[in-house]
Amino acid sequence: MPTFSLDGREIEFQPGDTVIAAAHRSGIDIPHYCWHPGLSVAANCRMCLVEVAPPPGRGAMMLDVLRYDEAKGQYVPAKKPKLQPACQLPVVEGLEIKSQTSEHVTEARAAVQEMLLLNHPVDCPICDQAGECRLQDYWLEHSGKQKRMKDEIIHMPKAVDFGPTIVYDAERCIVCTRCVRFCDEVVGDPVLDKRERGNLGEIVLAPGRQLDHAYTLMTEHVCPVGALTAKDFRFKARVWFLRSVPSVCQGCATGCNAYTDYDPRNQTVYRHRPRENQAVNKCWMCDAGVLDYRRVHSRRIFHASVRTESASLPAAMQAAAQEIARFGNASAVLLSAEHSSEDNLAVFELGKALGINKFFVSGRPAGEGDDILRSADKNSNRAGAMLVAGGSNVGDSEALRAAIEAGDVTQLVALGSQVESEGLAAALKRLASLVALSTHEGPIAAAAKVLLPASSWAEATGTYVNISGLAQVSEKAITPKGDSLPGWKLAVALAEATGKSLPFKKGKDVKAAVSSSVSTTAGAEA
Ligand code: SF4
Ligand code: SF4
Ligand code: FES
C-alpha cells in the first residue's frame, strides 16, 4: 500500500484519500470540526490546517504576514508557510505533512480556536455537550488561553425548537454545516440550511418545515458542539458520569452497531449512539433505534407470577415445572426474534429435553423500512433464532396461530414479549397452558399461566444475527432489573426444575455453543 509521512510517521493510504481520512483510519486524530468520515468535505472550520513540505527542489509557498514584535512594540513584516486543510488535501505518495510538529500549525490552531470562541456563550455548566465537546477539548489541547476580546458577544437565537426531537442554539453554533450536509447527503431531505455570514451565520429550517425525518437525532450526533441538543437527553445526565459498552441496536433487523451509555450509580441506561461499522450502519442510526434504549426501562416485568398472582422466582419455577409435567403431545415451544441467540438456544434445548418437537418463532410486528438503514422487520435476531433451531422446521406466527386454533398446540413454553399478529395474540388466550419467559408486558405475558421475568438485552451479553446474516455481540451494560434473569438462565433453571439438564450451565458454555453455529462480527469499531 502507498504511504505518506505525517509528523515523521509512515502512514498508509488508499487511492482518493485525503490526509485527514488516511490519518483517521490509522487512528491518528488531526483536530477537526467540519470534517466527518461519513459526509462530504466542506473545509470551512480551518481547524485541521497542516504544513505541507514543498516538492524537492521547490521552495514552500510563503505568505506575507505582520507579526507583533514585543521588543519594538509594533507589528513588523514577516513570512509564514501557507497551511492547507487536511480534510481537503488529497494524499499522494511521498507527501510530507507536519501536524503536531509544526510551530505554524500550532499557532494557526490556537488562532482558529480563539476565533471560534470569540462569540461563544459561557454555557458549559448548563450545556449537554459539556464533557464531550470539541470546543472544550480543543481549547485545552490547542489554546488554553483567555480570549482577548472584551466586547459583549453577538447574541443569537437560543433554544429554537427545530421539531419533535431537536433544539437549536445559534450562539453555540460554529456553522460547520455538518447537520446541513447530513440531512442533504445521507437522508436526502435538505431541511436545514445556513443563512448569513461571519458572526451572523446560523442554521435555519427550510420555510414551512420542521426537522422531522426519520434520522433527526443524527443531526444532534454529528454536531461537534452543543448547538443541537436532543430533547430526549437534554438536562438528563452529565456525560462524565456515564459509562459505555459496545452494543447492537434492538430496533430492527439491520443490527446497527451502537454504544449503550448508562449510569453505573443508578444502573440506568440514558442513551444509545452509533458505533461506526462500515459493513452495517456506517456512522449512523435511525431515530427509532437511538430511542429504543427506553424499552430497557419501560413496561418491564420485574417479578414472577403464577396465574397473575405475584410469586417468588423459586415458587414460580416450581409452578412452571408442574405445568410442564402435564404437557402432552399438543405442546410446542415459541422462540423469540427479540431475544439473543443464547436465550433462544437455551429455550430450544429445553424444548428438546422435554421431548417437544414443534417449534415456532415470533416477535415484534413489522413496521416501516427504508433504503438507508431501517428494516421493516423490527426484531434484532430473527435470523439467529432460526439458526439455533435448525431453520427449516420452525413455524412462523401464522403457523402457530393456525396450530392453536386447530387444537394441535394447547400447551406452550414461550420466550419473548410481543407477537406479530393480533390473531396470534388472541389465539394465545385459548391455550390450556402457557409458561412464558418475558421481558415486557404484552400479549405473551397477558396470556401466561406462569410468568418468569427475563432480563433485557442491556442486562446480558448476547449474540444477534442481523438481516444480512452477520452475527454481532451486544455487551451487558447494567445488572438485571428486579428478579429478572437472562432468558438462557431461566431456561437452564426450568430444565433443572423439571428434572432435565441442558448441555450447558454457564454463560461461557452457552456462548460457545452459539459461536459454533454463527459467523463472527465484521467491520466494527470496538
Ligand atoms: S448546529 Fe452543530 S452541526 Fe450544525 S452547523 Fe452548527 S455546529 Fe455545525
Ligand atoms: S435501522 Fe434498525 S438497527 Fe439501525 S438504528 Fe434504526 S432501528 Fe436500530
Ligand atoms: S475539518 Fe474543518 S476545515 Fe478541515
Image (cartoon, rainbow, N blue to C red):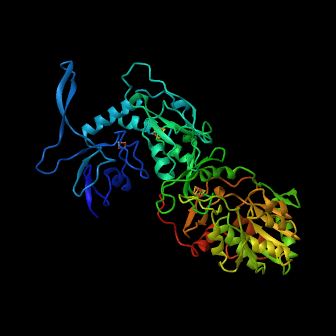
**Residue at screen point 74% across, 69% down:** 491
Q: Position of residue 8 (x, y in %)?
A: 24, 51
- Residue 400's x, y, as percent? 78, 73
Residue at the location (72% across, 50% down)?
A: 298
Can see residue 257?
yes
Q: Please indicate whether residue 43 sits to the left or right of residue 121 in the image.
A: left
Most extreme residue toward the front, as rendered?
Answer: 208
Quadrant of picture, ligand 3 = top left
Q: Is residue 411 above or below residue 264?
A: below
State the residue in front, 317 or 131: 131
Residue 299: where, in percent of width, then height? 75, 52
Front-most of residues 69 and 476: 69
On the image, the x and y values in percent for residue 159 come to 57, 31
Q: Which residue is at 21% across, 18% downward?
A: 73
Q: Quadrant of the N terminus?
A: bottom left
Q: Residue at x 18, y 19 (%)?
A: 72
Q: Is residue 406 left or right of residue 134?
A: right
Is residue 486 shown left or right of residue 497?
left
